Image (tube, grey):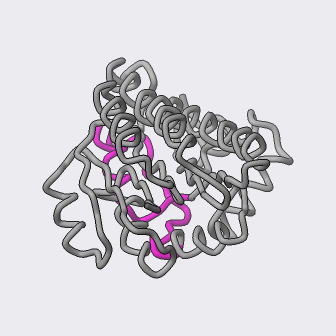
């Protein structure tokens, strides 16, 4: 049985990807994963494709264990793994509760590694892993410090993994979106509504996802949707990180 596994499916990029699956891939079943079962069931009703709803909190070991056990029982062929679950927070590192930072690391990094580890044994030639990284992966980002660091990990992990898996015909992709019109910004601003308020360019999620599919089909390793975003990524290679951080802080009118 060929399947697609999609975490973070109840909102944001995960939800948008789910809506585009039918016209881009052919699988027997899609496993949609998120904490909120009611939202997953609403999504399932919108899709003209067979779905298995998995209400997992991927920061919990028992959820990862349940996923691994299900794979061992069914032994599917995973054609696509979308690791989308994750979130960010705006604010000064010292002002945010440590439990929130720990949870962010668990979701953005640990769960992604764990999901990938358990999935790879059920992947074969011409399978794909798509990890959500970020434009913030290319340089340190003050006031999004832990989030940016977590996305740098995702980018580095994906590129190394893609190299390792090439001989098996498995392709790993890192999607690095710029500011996008999802619920990410509202969630990230929940702890500090004043520190990050300038968003010079905001893309629509439909544009990001369409570009993602186009580049995935060409086996592109690092996917950066949007000319503006790609220009900034090129600039990060030219200028020092210290300069980039100063420009970023100045753009947000942060003086400390």
Residue 227, x across and y down, in percent: 69, 71
Going 57% across and 58% down the picture, which residue do you hit?
A: 177
Going 66% across and 37% down the picture, which residue do you hit?
A: 157
Up the image or down, 120 lies above or below 28; here it is above
Going 45% across and 23% down the picture, which residue do you hit?
A: 93
Query: Is residue 144 visible to the viewer in this orientation of the structure?
Result: no
Up the image or down, 202 lies above or below 132; here it is below
Where is residue 214, by image quadrant? bottom right
Observer-nearest residue: 95 or 183? 183
Up the image or down, 42 lies above or below 74; here it is below
Q: Is 191 in the magenta?
A: yes
The answer to whether residue 168 is left or right of residue 256 is right
The answer to whether residue 205 is left or right of residue 32 is right
Q: Which residues are magenta?
A: 178-207
Residue 69, x across and y down, in percent: 35, 34
Going 86% across and 48% down the picture, which residue do you hit?
A: 238
Residue 166, x across and y down, in percent: 77, 49
Query: Is residue 221 visible to the viewer in this orientation of the structure?
Result: yes
Question: Which residue occupies the extreme right position in the image?
Answer: 238
């Amino acid at each position: 049985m060929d399947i697609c596994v999609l975490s973070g499916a109840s909102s944001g990029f995960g939800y948008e990807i789910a809506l585009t699956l039918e016209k881009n891939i052919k699988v027997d079943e899609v496993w949609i994963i998120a904490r909120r079962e009611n939202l997953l069931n609403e999504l399932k009703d919108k899709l003209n494709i067979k779905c298995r709803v998995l209400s997992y909190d991927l920061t919990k070991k028992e959820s990862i264990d349940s996923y691994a056990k299900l794979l061992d029982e069914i032994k599917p062929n995973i054609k696509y793994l979308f690791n989308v679950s994750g979130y960010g927070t705006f604010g000064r590192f010292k002002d945010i509760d440590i439990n929130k930072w720990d949870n962010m690391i668990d979701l953005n990094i640990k769960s992604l590694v764990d999901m990938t580890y358990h999935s790879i044994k059920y992947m074969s030639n011409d399978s794909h892993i798509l990890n959500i990284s970020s434009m913030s992966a290319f340089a340190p980002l003050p006031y999004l410090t832990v989030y940016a660091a977590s996305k740098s990990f995702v980018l580095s992990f994906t590129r190394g993994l893609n190299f390792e898996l090439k001989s098996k015909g498995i392709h790993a992709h890192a999607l690095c979106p710029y500011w996008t019109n999802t619920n990410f910004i509202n969630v990230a601003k929940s702890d500090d509504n004043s520190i990050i308020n300038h968003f010079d360019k905001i893309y629509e999620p439909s544009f990001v996802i369409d570009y993602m599919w186009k580049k995935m089909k060409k086996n592109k390793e690092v996917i950066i949707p949007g000319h503006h975003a790609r220009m900034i990524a090129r600039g990060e290679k030219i200028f020092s990180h210290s300069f980039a951080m100063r420009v970023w802080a100045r753009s947000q009118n942060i003086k400390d």
